[in-house]
Amino acid sequence: MTKADIVNTLFEKVGLPKKEAQDIIEIILSTMKETFVQGESIKISGFGTFNVRQKSARRGRNPKTGEEIEITPRRVVTFRPSNQLKEMIEKAD
């Protein structure tokens, strides 16, 4: 699903004009990005939690050459689904 698909879903199900739906999606996503940059988590009840994690430096290996390399420390976003979402996914199988 793409951002355009989400906009179309809002247009069809809620009846919002496409431009308005697109603006709402952009505001939500930019707010989420700003929150992640600040290092904060986002919890969406019934959906899951997005966390920003700090990964430390570690040794890695280039799969093509087998050469050992140093992987630099970095921050990553992780997602942990809620129990409700997990149950919905399990029932869908």
Image (tube, rainbow, N blue to C red):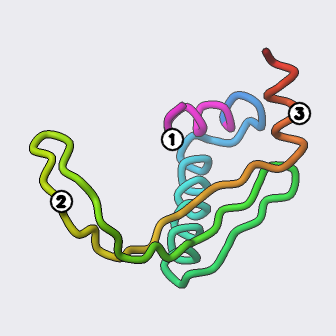
Left-right relation of 56 to 3: left
Mark 1 or 2: the one toward you: 2
Give the structural element (helix, strand or loop) at label 2. strand
Residue 6 location (% of width, % of height): 60, 37
Query: Relative to residue 13, is residue 35 drawn left or right?
Result: left
Q: Nearer the viewer, mark 3 or mark 2?
A: 2
For marks 1 and 2, the one nearer the N-term is: 1
Q: Residue at x 54, y 31 (%)?
A: 1
Q: CA distance from mark 1 to mark 3?
A: 25 Å
Q: Which residue is mark 2?
A: 68
Q: Considering only order in the chain, which callout, 3 or 1, is on the residue closer to the N terminus? A: 1
Instruction: Give the label on residue 3, or none.
Output: 1
Count all numbered tags in the image, as a single digit. Answer: 3
Q: Nearer the viewer, residue 38 or 7?
A: 38
Q: Which residues are magenta?
A: 1-10
Tell me which corner region of the image, top left, top right, bottom left or bottom right, holds residue 91.
top right
Instruction: Give amino acid for label 3.
Output: Glu
Q: What is the number of the mark on residue 87?
A: 3
Any magenta on residue 6?
A: yes
Q: Residue at x 75, y 48 (%)?
A: 81
